[in-house]
Structure formats: C-alpha cells, structure tokens
Image (tube, helix red, strand yellow):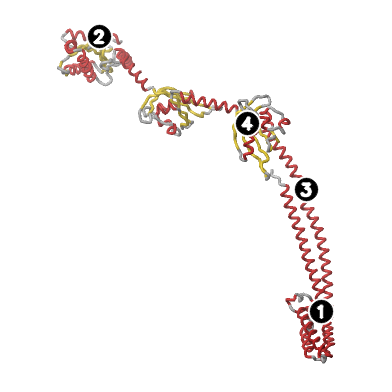
Amino acid sequence: MKIDVGRHLGRRFFAAMLLVVAIAAADFLVVDYHTRTASRDAEITNLAGRQRMLAARIASLVNHLALPEMQAEMDETVARMRDGFQRLTQPDGGYLDAAAVRELCLGGDRPVRPRVAEYLAAAERGDVELITAMYKPLAADIDRSVTAYAEFATHRIRVLRTIEAATFATQLLVLWLIWRFIFRPMAQRIDRDFRALDASRTRTRAILDAAGEGICGIDNVGCIIFINDKACHLLGCAKDDALGANLHDLAHHHDAAGTMVPAESCSVLRAAQDGSQQRLQLDAFWRQDGSRFPVEVVVAPLRSLEGFVGAVIVFSDISERKQAEACYELSSNVLNTIAEGVFITTPDGTITRTNPAFSVVTGYQPDEAIGQTPRILKSGRHDAAEYRAMWEAIARRGFWNGEIWNKRKSGEIFCASQSIAAIRDGRGEVTHYVAVFKDVTDHKANEDAIRRQAYHDHLTGLPNRNLFMDRLKLAIAQARRKERRMAVMFVDLDHFKEINDRLGHAVGDVVLCEASRRLRDALREGDTVARLGGDEFIVLLADLSDSPDAATVAAKMLERMAQPFDLPEDSARLGASIGIALFPQNGDDADTLIQAADAAMYVVKAEGRNGYRFA
C-alpha cells in the first residue's frame, strides 16, 4: 500500500492557500479600485469647484478689461478654465465614467459643455452683457454637478465599506470551509494512513518472517536494522542480538579456510555500496555455534536523495545445492569416461544429451545429435513389429536390452548391444529415457565365425555332421507330424584317393570344393548336403512326394559328378557311389536312416561304383 501523506497534505494545503490568496487578491483589487476612484472623485470635485471659481473670476474681470493688467489676467483665467473643462470632458481624461461629469457635459436640457464654450468665447471678446447674462445660470449648473458628484463619491464609500464587510465574511466562510473540507478530512486521512501503515508494517513483518530465505537490512556502515526469523535461524542467533550488530562481524568474519576477512574486503558490504543489485555465492557464512555453511546472497542497495543509505540482503543455505552439483559433476564425469555410448531423450524421443563414446561409435557430434531423435541411427534392418515389441517391453518392465542394428553417420551399419531404461519422477511419470550401447559388430562376427566353425566344414563351407544331425532330427519330426516322406543319401566320391595321392592334397582340396558345389547345385531348395569328412558327403531330401524323387536327385548328382574336373595341370573325372534310405520305410530315426544309407552306398561300391541304390 502506497501512502504519501506529505504530498496529499501539500496538495490540499496548496489548494486552500490558492483560494485564500484569490480572495485576498480580489479584495485588494476591489479596494484598490475604489480607493483610486475615491482619490479621483476628490480630484474631480476640486477641479469642478475650480471651474466655478474661474467662472466667477471671469464675470468679475469682464467689467475691468480696460486696464491692461486685467486683460492679461482674463486671458490666463479663460485658458485655465478651458483647460480644466477639457480635462473633465475629454474621454481619455478618465472622468466620463462619473455620473456627475456626464451630467455636466451632456445631461439635462441645458448641456454645460456648449454653454461653457460660449461663455469662454464671450470672455475673450469682452462681451460684458453676455457674460453677465450667462454667469448665474452657468454657475448654478456647475454647482449642481459638483453636488451630484459629491453624492456619487459618498455612494462609492458606502459600496467600499459593504465590499470590505462581505470580504471579511467570505474569508471567515473560506476558513470554515478549509477546516471542514481540507484539514479535518486530512487529519482523518492521516489517521487512516498511519493505521494502514502500521497494518502494512505488521504484514510486511509477517511476510518477511514467512519467507524461505534469510532477509536482513543494513545501514550504510553495515549494521543490521531489521532481520527476519529465517535469517536468525540460519545464523543461529536471537533477533535482539542481531539488531544493531554489524553483518560482517556477525556472519562473514572468516572465509571457508578460517582466514579472517577484513571488513573493507567484505564482498557483501562492497556489493551493497556498489549501487547495483548483485548475486554472490560465498563459501562461508558463520553461525553463532562456530559452524559454517555456503550461501547464495542477493544484495539490493537502498539509496535516497542523500545517497547510499543501506541495503537489503537476501541469503539462503545452498549446502544441498552444492551436494547436488557435486553429484551431478560426478555423474557427468562418469558419463564422459565410460566406454559405452550413452544418450538421453525426453519422453517424446528428443535427444538431450550424449557422451563422448556416443560420438566415437556413431560419428555424430553432440551438436549434431542433440535435438534429433534416435531415428538418425535407424539402419532399416528392423521392421515396425520389432520396435513395437521393444517399446512394449519398456512400458511393461521399465527397461529393454538386446542387440539392434544401427547406422553410423557415415552410413556404415553396426550391431549394438543396447539397453534402454525409463527414468521416472516421484509421481511415477516418465521424464527421460536413457540408452546405453556398445558396438559388438566384431564380437558378433567372431561369434558367427565360431558358430560357423562349429557347424560347418572349414574347407567346403558345407554343414558338418553336427548341423546335419540337427536338421535331420528336425526334418524327421516334421515328416512324422505331417506324415510325409523324406530320404537320406550317403555319397562317396569314386577315385578321389588316387587324385589326392597323385596330384597332392592342395589339388584334392580343389576337387572337394568343386564336388561340393556340384552336389549343392543338384539339390532342391530346402535340401541339405553336408561333408562328413574326407570324400564322404551326406544329403537330406526333405518333404518327398515319392521315392522316384530321390532317384531323380541321385541321377542328377551322378550326371554332375561325371563331368571333368579342370585342374591346374590336368583334368580328371570322378564318379560317386550313392546309398539312399527312405523314411519311414528304412527307419524312423536319424541313426537308423544314416546306417541304412551307408550300407546301400557300400553295396554300390561293391557292384562297380558310380551309381545309386536304395536300402
């Protein structure tokens, strides 16, 4: 609430004084006017009286004009009367506003002005008869005018007295009005304002005491002039002990290391006298029990027309904030030093932070990734169903981990072992998602190589016995469930040992690889050929319609194998001995079928090779 008693009282007092001055000025002007008019009335009365005397002197002199000295006096008297009458009757003389003068000059049946002129002309001519005839009537008219003007002057005096009485009564009325409508309401207003000021002071004190920060005011030398409850609590002192104490001596006398801080070096006092609001962070404010705490201080200087008068100091304990900043710095350092790539997103997927490992793995610098979404890493190898399953797992369990194919900035595809976790606030609402990943492309390639070595022949790349057995067992289960037929073929290359012994193992390896390719080309899609070792191969024909289908495949193999093998220094021809076992006629499990096919193959070899035979 803004209370400006002085200005309000000043405005009203000024208005009252203007009114009093206006009345006094009006009274002065009226009195001055009538005073000047009264003076002029006396002047006119005297002037008119002199005209009566001059007229009488003319009447006296006209009978003695024979004497030279009388003629000169007559001329002088005529001139004086004419001049005086002109002064009375000229408008610029200022007398025509008087009723008597108007009567003298213009009024009645016998205007005085032309008769005066005639009278003076007769005096100049020395016309005794005319002067004698005109003197008495003219003198009577002049006497009548003088009497009328004297009555008019008396009337003016009565008016002046009436005005003075009215002015006095008006001044009394104005004084009553000033008391009634200015000073009495002003006194009531001042009383209300002081009550409001007291209530405002009480509210301000309550607000200061309810504030969450310590608040105190200091004068221009740093002594505390007010302080709230929170400040007393933070400093561990009573309010009475704080009031009047120097803030520097009370709370900032030493730094965090315990070194004494001189008052002239106190940053709080310097900021207060600097003239602008400042925000400071100090390592130490001291409590009365000797303990210290870090503070954030806002200093707002107070100035008046006389200059610096003090400052308001607002301070708060930032111990928890310092601890949080330390934890944040630690987490940032951890984030920046871990080898895994990390990125953090908002709930809508906008990337807000990355770590250096993210840039190393993906090629995206922080300014290129922040503000984008993880779609910049999308490789295109996963369909929408896979991503949907991933987000369903995050929504259900709060996290997901697994392998995902991502794309670097360069366009290179890499495999990442990645985990995504949802970060929730106290209400359980998701505020961020954190993804941690590492490039496992090489590791995955090594695993694939190991897995391939475990299930494939290292020379030909064909499945080995382990993988073949897995596929055979699966095919038997499916054939049994669907009541379908299948076949196992045991293949042995004819005359391979002679080529291997004659041309060497390197050439033998070339022959084995070419034979493997020809066997694959002879099979249908979905069939399997595996190398058991040496020159022995085994074939799985799944989902046969009839046994002739197996014979057709065997014949195609023999045809392919009969073609010459182009070798580095020669060419060679091979054949193949093929034994065929049918499911379920020749057995309903893997071992039985393989044994039956193997036995049939040996029968073919015994009968001359390069052929096939059913078990």
The residue beneath circle 3 is: 187
Q: Secondary structure at mark 1?
A: helix
Q: Secondary structure at mark 3?
A: helix
Q: CA distance from mark 2 to mark 1?
A: 176 Å
Q: CA distance from mark 4 to mark 3?
A: 43 Å
Residue 516, given in percent of the width and then of the height, sits at 23, 17
Residue 168, given in percent of the width and then of the height, sits at 82, 61
Q: Are marks 3 and 2 in contact (CB under 8 Å)?
A: no
Closer to the chain start, of discs 4 and 3, is 3
Q: Residues within 10 Å of mark 4 (few under 14, many from 20)?
A: many
Closer to the chain start, of discs 2 and 4, is 4
Q: CA distance from mark 2 to mark 4?
A: 91 Å
The residue beneath circle 4 is: 316
Which mark, by number, is residue 62? Answer: none
Closer to the chain start, of discs 3 and 2, is 3
Q: Nearer the viewer, residue 528 or 175?
A: 175
Nearer to us of marks 1 and 3 is 1
Q: Residues within 10 Å of mark 3 (few under 14, many from 20)?
A: few
The residue beneath circle 2 is: 596
Type of amino acid under label 3:
Ala
Type of amino acid under label 1:
Ala
Closer to the chain start, of discs 4 and 1, is 1
Question: Which image quadrant is residue 476 in?
Answer: top left
Q: Is residue 357 left or right of residue 608?
A: right
The residue beneath circle 1 is: 48
